[in-house]
Amino acid sequence: MKKLNILVACEESQAVTRELRLLGHNAYSCDLLPCSGGHPEWHFNIDVFEVIENKGGELQNGKKVKIKSNWDIMIAHPPCTYLAVSGAQWYYHPADKHLPVVNRRPHPKYPNRAKDREEAVEFFIALANAPIDRIVIENPVGIISSRFRKPDQVVQPFMFGDEARKTTCLWLKNLPKLEPTNMVGEGERIYFKSGKSQPKWYSDAFVKSKSHEERRTMRSKTFIGMAKAMAEQWTKI
């Protein structure tokens, strides 16, 4: 098996990076956040485009690393806060629901939400256009489908052995669609008095987290079964 150079962009958990390393690949995670996966020697704690352009950079532990050849694959997990449909309620003033969108005021708590969304879209498209031959970008259902293009595939953790629902869209460049490895149940759900519900793992993140940032990080982590499938299937090139 050829040892591949793989960049896992916007991943502080190192879930996918760890599975790639177990297969013997030269994989590195990259995020503006320090890694929580326990391997700072595999983690670029800098802007991802610095890593792409310079084929390396400074790791979280201060060591300089230079990749000997180009990146073979990039697996990217850009932040979804401003891209996902779940955040649409925070764009406009709640008192303006009856008005046409063009006449609604910004949400009082998040007056810069529209600007933040545009920057998030630009970042996503820049990743998709990075000078790497094989790219996959994952994100939940959101604005990217209309602003960029529809995803090539939509997957769920329960397709890969984890009893949970987390709709994940994949935009692929020269990489195959993931094949399900172990279909299981969709997992528990929490039901509210309003009649709405959400997956238990998602609700648990709210209970266990101490801050908005920590909750966002917990909810963005890749399930282990899907991480294994990504590592095993996308490196067979």
Image (cartoon, rainbow, N blue to C red):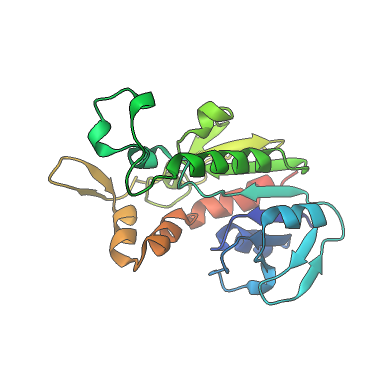
Q: Farthest residue in the left direction?
A: 193
Q: Is residue 155 above or below residue 99?
A: below
Q: Is residue 204 above or below residue 188?
A: below
Q: Residue placed at 58% from the left, 31% from the top?
A: 152
Give 105 or 3, whichever is nearer the viewer: 105
Q: Position of residue 193 (x, y in %)?
A: 12, 45
Q: Quadrant of the N terminus?
A: bottom right
Q: Residue placed at 62% from the left, 73% from the top?
A: 39
Q: Position of residue 226 (x, y in %)?
A: 52, 50
Q: Position of residue 213 (x, y in %)?
A: 42, 61
Give 141 or 47, whichever is nearer the viewer: 47
Q: Farthest residue in the top direction?
A: 100
Q: Residue placed at 34% from the left, 60% from the top?
A: 205
3 sits to left or right of 187 = right
213 sits to left or right of 79 = left
Count of all numbered marks drawn on residues in the image: 0
223 sits to left or right of 163 = right
Give 115 or 35, whichever is nearer the viewer: 115
Q: Position of residue 112 (x, y in %)?
A: 44, 45
Q: Residue placed at 43% from the left, 43% from the top?
A: 113
Q: Quarter-wise, where is residue 33 in the image?
A: bottom right
Residue 235 visible here: no
Q: Quadrant of the C terminus?
A: top right
137 sits to left or right of 224 = right
Residue 66 visible here: yes
Q: Is residue 138 above or below residue 7?
A: above
